[in-house]
Image (cartoon, helix red, strand yellow):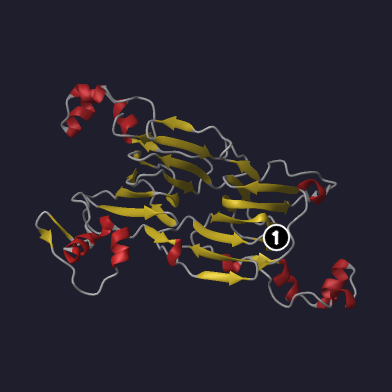
């Protein structure tokens, strides 16, 4: 009896008389986490590229002071517009002074850190950010990150799918590859004063927990940056709907973030991110907690379903219709991100509701009164008892 019970828990690629058992070599744990890949819904059809990759399957770089791992177009080839980095800094540890060819958007997952930058006019920025806060550094702007007393883990998102965290411009690396005579001339230093300079990049390294923010402030003669590089996302009042909440942050609410916008979606059990698509750009997703699935329609009769858990990355190409459904007993929380200054989506419900009702009724063979009952305003999150 116990053996039969165990066998019943092993998923099999079969449904309604189609498929069969898999008795050969297999990774049952992955099959259990991806039931809609092992046994796709009947609505799936054709060959659709992979749109999922987990940070748990990414290479982790270990450093004195923390770790980092990334999901780029190398790991998820379809993700051409954005790339992501998951980074942890121990208390007091630094992500050293550096800059990128790409803009950097970030979401604090746990803990807190101090972030600092100086722009091309010498105007400076310094702030402490904690769980649920964002920051954005434009391309080329030098900055640093230092963990506060509790340490920090954060998600970084860059506006190029081919970005790699291993190819950033770092102060230690720059100076290590500049002749000491040039450094001496540039800064007015002597060879003895430069004796302990690093011979290679430091990247992530241990330091002391920073002092109070006000004691770290530096007054620049050119002032502070005009558009603050941080934003309190969780302090922003969410849009509430039956089934969950949505917080949208783009250049209208976070002026500094000119190339990346985002939505933080929280779906209650049974809730669903409605059928929709985006008219301006691809969508890059990061799942924070919970369990759910996403169905994607790629036109021409092509469709595929993916399952997601915390730490997974999802991707939806421009204009593909899709939904995200909470299948668990706890909230499904995830970020939607776009390489675009404004957040824009098309709601299938709102589209149909604002057409002459007979047009939609005739198209999908539904009674006209069913179409007339649809809400004309946008409701990004829905639930069964709408």
Q: In the orientation shown, which residue stands out farthest toward the left?
A: 17
Residue 383 higher or lower than 94, as above or below: above
> Left or right: 56 with respect to 349?
right
Direction from residue 301 to residue 107 in the image, left or right: right
Residue 153, picture quadrant? bottom right
Give the quarter of the image for residue 36. bottom left
Residue 305 seen: yes
Secondary element under disc 1, as helix, strand or loop, is loop
Compared across the picture, whether 91 is left or right of 78 comes to right
Camera sees residue 73: no
Residue 10 place in picture, x, y as percent: 23, 63
Q: Compared with residue 381, is residue 5 higher up or lower down, i.e. above or below? A: below
Please determine whether, in this image, residue 108 is positioned above or below residue 357: below
The residue that mark 1 highlights is 92
Q: Residues within 10 Å of mark 1 (few under 14, many from 20)?
A: many
Which residue is located at x 41 percent, y 62 percent?
76
Residue 19: image location, x then y, percent: 13, 62
Give the total number of marks visible in the rendering: 1
**Residue 30 figure quarter:** bottom left
Percent coordinates x, y for residue 183 in the rendering: 83, 72
Q: Quadrant of the N terminus?
A: bottom left
Image quarter hosting the C terminus: top left
Query: Horizontally, is 51 left or right of 119 in the view?
Result: left
The residue nearer to you, when weighing 168 against 356, is: 168
Q: Nearer the viewer, residue 340 or 324?
A: 324
Q: Position of residue 166 (x, y in %)?
A: 58, 69
Relative vertical location of residue 145 with respect to residue 354 in this rendering, above or below: below
Task: Say which residue appears at 40% left-offset and 61% top-offset.
Answer: 53
């Amino acid at each position: 009896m116990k053996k039969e019970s165990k066998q019943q828990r092993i998923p099999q690629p079969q449904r309604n008389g189609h498929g069969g058992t898999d008795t050969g070599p297999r990774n049952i744990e992955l099959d259990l986490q991806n039931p809609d890949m092992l046994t796709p819904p009947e609505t799936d059809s054709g060959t659709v590229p992979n749109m999922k990759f987990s940070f748990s399957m990414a290479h982790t770089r270990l450093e004195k002071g923390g770790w980092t791992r990334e999901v780029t177009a190398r790991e998820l080839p379809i993700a051409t517009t954005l790339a992501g980095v998951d980074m942890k800094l121990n208390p007091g540890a630094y992500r050293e002074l550096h800059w990128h060819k790409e803009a950097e958007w970030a979401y604090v997952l746990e803990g807190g850190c101090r972030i600092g930058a100086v722009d091309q006019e010498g105007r400076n920025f310094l702030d402490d950010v904690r769980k649920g806060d964002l920051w954005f550094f434009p391309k080329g702007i030098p900055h640093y990150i230092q963990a506060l007393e509790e340490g920090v883990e954060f998600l970084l998102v860059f506006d190029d799918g081919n970005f790699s965290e291993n190819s950033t411009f770092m102060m230690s690396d720059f100076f290590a590859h500049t002749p000491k005579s040039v450094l001496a001339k540039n800064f007015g230093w002597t060879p003895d004063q430069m004796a302990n300079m690093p011979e290679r990049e430091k990247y992530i390294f241990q330091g002391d927990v920073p002092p109070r923010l006000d004691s770290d402030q530096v007054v620049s003669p050119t002032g502070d940056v005009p558009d603050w590089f941080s934003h309190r996302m969780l302090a922003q009042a969410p849009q509430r709907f039956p089934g969950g909440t949505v917080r949208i942050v783009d250049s209208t609410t976070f002026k500094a973030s000119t190339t990346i916008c985002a939505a933080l979606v929280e779906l209650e059990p049974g809730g669903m991110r409605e059928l929709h698509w985006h008219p301006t750009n691809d969508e890059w997703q990061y799942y924070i907690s919970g369990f759910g699935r996403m169905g994607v329609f790629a036109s021409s009769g092509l469709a595929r379903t993916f399952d997601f858990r915390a730490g997974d990355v999802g991707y939806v190409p421009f204009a593909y219709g899709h939904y995200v459904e909470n299948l668990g007993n706890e909230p499904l929380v995830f970020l939607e991100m776009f390489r675009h200054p404004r957040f824009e989506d098309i709601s299938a419900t709102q589209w149909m509701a604002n057409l002459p009702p007979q047009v939609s009724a005739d198209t999908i063979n539904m009674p006209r009164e069913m179409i007339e009952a649809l809400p004309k305003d946008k409701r990004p999150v829905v639930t069964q008892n709408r």
